[in-house]
Image (cartoon, coloured by chain):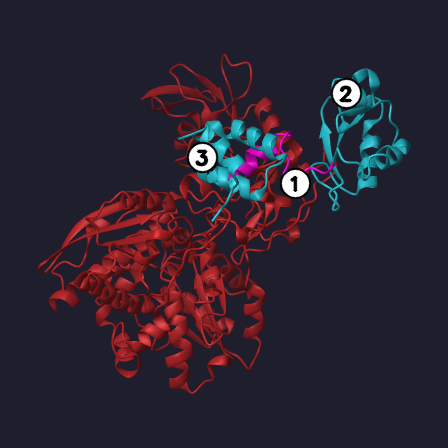
Amino acid sequence: MFEIEVNNRKIEARKGEMLLGALRRNGIHVPTLCHMENLFPTGACRLCVVEVNGQRNLVPSCAFPVYEGMTVQTHSPRVVRARKTIVELLLADHPDDCLYCVRNGNCELQKLAEQLGVRERRYTGAKSAYKLDISSPSITRDPAKCILCGRCVRVCEEVQTVSAIDFIGRGSKATVSTAFEEGLNVSSCVNCGQCVVVCPTGALREQSHVKEVLGVLNNPSKFVVVQHAPSISVSLAEEFGLKAGTDVVGKMTTALRRLGFQRVFDTSFSADLTILEEGSELVQRLTTGGKLPMLTSCSPGWIKFVETFYPDLVENLSTCKSPQQMMGAIIKSYYAQRQGIDPKSIYSVSIMPCTAKKFEAQRPEMGSDGTPDIDAVLTTRELARIIRMRGLDLAALEPQGADTPFGERSTAGKLFGATGGVLEAAIRTAHWLVTGAEMENLKVQAVRGLEGRKEARVKIGELELGVAAVNGLGNARKLLEELRAGRSDLHFIEVMTCPGGCIAGGGQPFNGDAEAVRARMQALYKIDRDEEQRVSHRNESVQRLYKEFLGKPLGEKSHHLLHTHYAPREVVM
Amino acid sequence: MVTAEKDIEEILGKYPNASRDALIPVLQAVQEARGYLSREVVLRIGRHLKLPASKIYGVATFYNQFRFQAPGRNHVQVCRGTACHVKGSAAVLESVKRVLKVNPGETTKDGEFSLEVVACIGACGLAPVICVNGEFHASVTPQKIQDILDSYRGKAR
């Protein structure tokens, strides 16, 4: 620790850190566009430039190490002029359609232009013409709005190790695109949407289902049901200016009813159902010599990742459909039957923290007899847009409960929203399945937290299981390489596509920093701490579902409705 | 499965256990052998060097020298160097594009012509200059392009 002088004031800096880090910690805001927390600085956007004594040129603070005795000016006229010029140059080749843009109001470029006081167009020139890429079921690319900050490329390559996109071409013709500039749908993209979350502008966005959903909500011949994923209720609040980690499940349920959804179900219910199926599948694989380790199958980006990059491990994937798809399947079978509704008149919507869920919902495997299990998927952000559109004041709504029978859930199902949660829920139920008794302490601390990989040895009766929870596909890849190299001490591995799990999914609110993600996770842990029903197998509605309809886990009906198979996939990679 | 022919395997064989630093020499050797980088070949190189296709395509499009379409029977190079520019090569290029109905880097549908823009051919005294199959045409004008190109039509290289 030593002191440096910034804007004629002393601040503390740590040896070896970059100047930007010291500035941010001390509450001095320097704008950035290309900077990404925890990744090596590229110094590409130059917005973080500052004046440092003894340096002839402005230096990028993100890539400039601190040293003792340095004096820095972060907002001198020269610095501010340079930043403003950069933004003006970016705007010179940017469409002027802010009013029509999906990021209107939360665009980083728009915000910078405002902060730097850009009020006239100083640079004019020909605008580049690009084609919109709407080929992906999950993500829309609009290169015209791209400012080439490179954040999407880096998250795709360095965090997810997918590398579906890269910088193509050079100079004024440079774009971010796929190999051979083909559609995202034929690339190696796994639809995780992490690129959308880091995009500062409207260049990357989810393939929106808002229009379709609003359409059916006004169609009296449709019976519109909605389910919301475990992580939604702890992240939606941020879209309405509430503190990160506020659980708004009751208010959200009210909002969904006001929007016109006829039934509001909780995906955590089908998470409980997943645990019974998946737990039974694990026990079956353990006792009958099935393929191990078993890999979870709830995260559709991860599924496509395995199909694409690790086809040799497809057999290790659990055959369980994801909770979204299980819910979809039982709504259009059991529920429709029970209520005497024609499944074809049901329109099933899910609110997901995820863009890959849009892809999953339209996979041909995910339906029966040509009827899809799920008709439309909205991200957390899209739900927030619809709520605002309807003029609902979320904070002021009176909380309501979800509908029966798929509104009941255990806290284990709710834990699905954070990395390690599926594993923790599965351990609780596997213990009961194997020993017939509950665990003494249900909390499995070893698999909690935001680390990229968590491993544990778990004793279940006579069995000792090796388990792991990994999040972020880069971390998953490392573990899969170990498996390929012959590692064999693991029996069950939970993988979440996004770093941190669904709470940091590709459909979650923008500007969710590490602190916000942590708060969302803590909110889920608090629910698990505070409530009584903490194991999936005690969910009475799930028990009734088995009694009245499914029979038993892995039974014939389950096999038909709740399980599927995955196959290697050939894409451009 | 990505299949590549013997010539490509031979080139890759010269770079065993290679990684990304071998990418550009490999791309150059492949283009030398094939005249262009096909989709299949890019994917094959990616497997060999353990590089994603997007990365290879990104590197290859950064440099002017790489093509992604098979060259035509006649290869047209239009110089856009400084001297040619001053002498009106922009209009010459427009004329070539109009006559051939292709953009630089592309090949006509009938496979007759391919078009490439080069930075300087080193014949500034002849500006503006175009080069077809290695033959130089000096002091060209947009009006002369049609006749020059027609004289190559149907003629094997």
Asked if A428 appears above or below A31 in the picture, the reply is below
What kind of residue is marked 1? Gln
- Inspect this view and state whether residue A296 appears: no
Chain B visual colour: cyan
**Which percent across, then down, holds residue A263?**
43, 76
Q: Mark 1 falls within which chain?
A: B
Q: Which chain is red?
A: A
Chain of the residue where label 2 is placed in the rendered structure? B
Q: Nearer the viewer, residue A159 or A232?
A: A159
Residue count near mark 2 (Cα–Cα under 10 Å), binned few <14, some 14–19, many ≥20: some
Which x, y percent locates residue A363? Answer: 47, 64
Instruction: Say which residue label 2 marks.
Output: B82
Q: Which residues are magenta?
A: B55-73
User: Which quadrant would residue A326 be assigned to in this image?
Assistant: bottom left
Residue B49 — which label?
3
Q: CA distance from mark 1 to mark 2?
A: 27 Å
Seen at 53% across and 52% down, the residue is A186
Q: Which of the two labelled residues, at mark 3 and mark 2, occupies the earlier sequence position?
A: 3
Q: Which mark is residue B69?
A: 1
| A17 in relation to A168, above or below | above
Amino acid type of the residue tagged 2 in the rendering? Thr
Look at the image and say whether residue B61 sits in the magenta stretch.
yes
